[in-house]
Image (spheres, coloured by chain):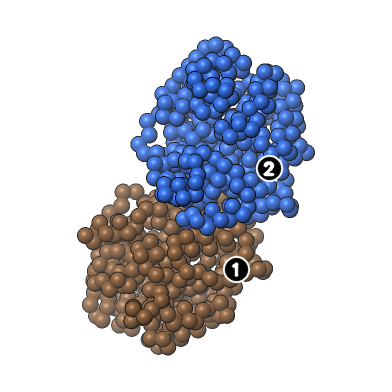
Chain colours: A blue, B brown
Amino acid sequence: MASTARFDVIAIGNAIVDVIARADDSLIEAEGLSKGSMRLIDAAEAERLYAAMGPAVEMSGGSAANTLAGMAVLGQRCSFIGQVADDQLGHVFTHDLRALGVAYETPALKEGAPTARCLILVTPDGQRTMNTFLGASHLLEQSMIDEEWIAASDILYLEGYLWDPPLSRAAMRRAIDVSRAAGRKVAFTLSDAFIIDRHGDDFRQLIAEGLFDILFANEVEIQALAETGDFEAAVASVAAQVPLLVVTRGAHGALAIEGGVRTEVAAEPVDTVVDTTGAGDLFAAGFLSGQAQGLPIADCLTMGAVCACEIIAQVGPRAQTDLKAKVAARLG
Amino acid sequence: MASTARFDVIAIGNAIVDVIARADDSLIEAEGLSKGSMRLIDAAEAERLYAAMGPAVEMSGGSAANTLAGMAVLGQRCSFIGQVADDQLGHVFTHDLRALGVAYETPALKEGAPTARCLILVTPDGQRTMNTFLGASHLLEQSMIDEEWIAASDILYLEGYLWDPPLSRAAMRRAIDVSRAAGRKVAFTLSDAFIIDRHGDDFRQLIAEGLFDILFANEVEIQALAETGDFEAAVASVAAQVPLLVVTRGAHGALAIEGGVRTEVAAEPVDTVVDTTGAGDLFAAGFLSGQAQGLPIADCLTMGAVCACEIIAQVGPRAQTDLKAKVAARLG
């Protein structure tokens, strides 16, 4: 099938610029934030919190977009659908994706909301706490979904975060149907526990209908989805319903279950965790690149682990090192 | 005098956001750029070059603003005058200065030009090649100069880059008079050889009139100013005309001549030069902080060398390490 596809992967996700500042734990506490989590904030709260933050660095982000950026560096043919506004941060986001060779043609929103930004506080332990102002990103309409591109992509990759806004949820639901009708695969990442709190019933229904070929989750998410505090029970329950389940476990590595066969890898060694922003996104980038290259599951997991390891040793979610060389060196 | 001053330093400079991308030497050659230099570009060229650049990181910049950011971290009381537009990059620039405690109240320009940006190509050798679209920054008018603040600052620090636009040149010329009338000191950095090519006569005249108390230059600039290819002759000629001359020499350290007494320091050791952006700016930050603290010239030079060393070991011109601790560790 790969020979007839225009893209290895097409993703629908939030189009966000990250605003990254180091912060002491005292700021996390004073703001009443839950370290390591993501929360949605409105424009007023974004302005207030920004004023309380230290000097920052701006870098393109967005979960699925980060995954595509990693996949493009690894040599995959990628395209992205996501909504920016016609403003300076929107231009930054667009430039950074296109500069990597990712096809991105969603027209910028002319008015209504500015480009999304995520205010990220990175504590001395390297943990990131995210505060997202969705702006234009949650205004992605179904009309922005290029059905030809989706039908021409081996994998449709969807970001759970975008299930929250009604407009983009409808767009993603339509994209799933288009992809499946074309005989392609649908991959989904659960993104965050709060998304499962709100939309777990939707996800369980989609899984029961057999609409997800590949499902990505971390330890917290898989348990939230399976509605159990028992990790192994959660994995077993979900694995029975999806063809390929991938679960990341931070420092404890990752596992995949495909057709009843379980494969596990350890985390790659990392000297210093600088900033965990993008760890899951880049794991998915490595794993899906391995899939696109037709590699065995163990190698896909290793590629994911190598990419995750690289991204947490730097600031921000877009790789500044040569991921391709790192993967080649590791896989031999 | 320090006890009566509101600020240790007030600076007038370009208000710029840096857009930093790694680039191969082949791009520098293909673009016909002079590696290590700065050039001014218009909006159309900025758009064209940006499209040719790889993915980037955005970080506040501007030569004198970088110096103030360093000084604020080192504990000095700083204020800044510079022109941004009322747009997203302008908000980023403003936030990053204020978050460091730098007083910055120049009203944003409502229309006419966007906030300045500098497209910086960083080659594998760590050299930066800068392409500056000045936008709103060169529209700094004399009415934006807060004369009370200038009269209340021990040192007025001026960036040579801003001598180029006629509006800001007039504003800076007025600021010099205000500072001197209040019995303060005027410090000036020559910024770049192209500025001296265009305005060397102005600078030589200002020096002859005794209007600069402290002058910063690098090796190329001091020779351009003195109109000689003999470094030592250039230093001797200029040192005879300014109370305090500071010359940075990259890997060869730095020297200062005050009242005929010459002091030299070696460069601090650095493992890997990642990005030279901001080296001169942070040298000035360390040196002027030493001056503000009343330290001997040798210590001022060492503070400059430590700060320059820190900034070239990271990406971008705003320190992401604890400069104050580094300086304290070095000076003992």
Query: Relative to residue A212, is residue B150 drawn left or right?
Result: left
The local crowd at label 1, few if under 14, some if 14 to 19, many if 20 or more residues have their Cα within 10 Å, is some
Label 2: chain letter = A
Percent x, y of residue B172: 50, 79
Pick whichever, A284 or A125, lies toward us: A125
Q: CA distance from mark 2 to mark 1?
A: 29 Å
Residue at 60% across, 47% down: A41
- Furthest toward the right, the residue is A143
Amino acid type, mark 1:
Ala
Amino acid type, mark 2:
His
Q: Which quadrant of the rendered structure holds the C terminus of chain B?
A: bottom left
Describe the element under mark 2 as helix, strand or loop.
helix
Residues tagged 2 and 1 counted as in contact (Cβ below 8 A): no
* B330 shown above or below B196: above
Percent x, y of residue B177: 46, 86
Residue at 40% across, 88% down: B209
Q: Which residue is mark 2?
A: A138
Pick whichever, B309 or B191, lies toward us: B309
Residue at 53% across, 74% down: B164
Q: Which quadrant of the rendered structure holds the N terminus of chain B?
A: bottom left
Q: Which mark is residue B108?
A: 1
Percent x, y of residue A45: 59, 52
